[in-house]
Amino acid sequence: MARGYGQFCGVARGLEIVGERWGLLLVRDLLVGPRRFSELRRGLPKIPTNVLSTRLRELEAAGVVRRRLLARPETGFEYELTEYGRDLDEAVMAFGRWGARSLGAPGQDEIVTVDSLVMALRSTFRPRAARRFHGSFELRMGDVVVHARIDRERLDVAAGGLAGADLVIEAGSILPALMAGEVAPAAAIKSGEVRLTGDAPLLDRFVELFQIGSAPARPGAASTA
């Protein structure tokens, strides 16, 4: 566990449990589903192996993560969240929504993973906008492919393609700007940065259903007051 903050406070205790570098990202990926050590390493390619081992041990000791034998014990085990760990779901999604407002365009050394994209769709979904909507999307960002099924206010997101998806969206670095309302769907299509297969008008619906909040004001920005 992280060094204590000397504070008798829930926020401080939470940071002591998951606030060490990489800790919360491991929780993010495990919220998508159980993962083997190699899968966690692949999803976080910049984490040193020894640090990954240390973080997993710390999360196990804190009761956030546990190991589970695979169906064939000789093939090893995988890590999964405990019930206590799964209770972080709402907090992680809220934190993701907050952080997404400052994303901007991805840097050259920043990657998108299947797990991060699944959680991005979960955290930006607006159930109220989906009250009368029923449909499905497949979203492709390079080699990363996920899909989303929506039945009114219910959302199911998973890795991989979806046969018969109502709309397939191929997008690159413009996606955050599109979801933040900084780029109109028609302009994104016209620029060639978004390619569609299927019911093209559903792109407008997609950006209504999955929204990133307004970006924070930057220091020195002109005031409209």
Image (cartoon, rainbow, N blue to C red):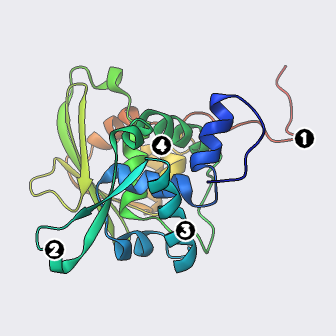
* Residue 148 drawn at (x, y percent): 24, 46
For the C terminus, the quadrant is top right
Q: Which residue is mark 3?
A: 54
- Disc 2 crowd rating (10 Å Cα; few below 14, some 14-19, many 20+) is few
The numbered mark at residue 84 is none
**In the rendered structure, are the residues bearing label 4 and label 3 in contact, judged by CB atoms less than 8 Å apart?**
no
- Disc 4 crowd rating (10 Å Cα; few below 14, some 14-19, many 20+) is many
Q: Earlier in the sequence, mark 1 or mark 2?
A: 2
Q: Which residue is mark 4?
A: 179
Secondary element under disc 4, as helix, strand or loop, is helix
Q: Quadrant of residue 192?
A: bottom left
Decide: is 130 above or below 195.
above
Which residue is painted at 47% across and 63% down in the image? 56
The numbered mark at residue 220 is 1
Alpha carbon separation for disc pair 3 and 2: 23 Å
Which residue is painted at 53% across and 58% down in the image? 58
The one of 109 and 51 positioned closer to us in this rendering: 51
> In the image, is 122 to the left or to the right of 146?
right
Name the residue type under label 4: Met
Q: Earlier in the sequence, mark 3 or mark 1?
A: 3
Alpha carbon separation for disc pair 3 and 1: 42 Å
Alpha carbon separation for disc pair 4 and 1: 25 Å
Q: How many marks?
A: 4
Alpha carbon separation for disc pair 1 and 2: 59 Å
Alpha carbon separation for disc pair 4 and 3: 36 Å
**In the rendered structure, are the residues bearing label 4 and label 2 in contact, judged by CB atoms less than 8 Å apart?**
no
Q: Earlier in the sequence, mark 4 or mark 2?
A: 2
> In the image, is 138 to the left or to the right of 165?
right
Q: Earlier in the sequence, mark 4 or mark 1?
A: 4
Examine the rendering and report whether any part of residue 173 can be seen: no
Please identify the residue farthest to the front as the structure is shown: 61
Secondary element under disc 2, as helix, strand or loop, is helix
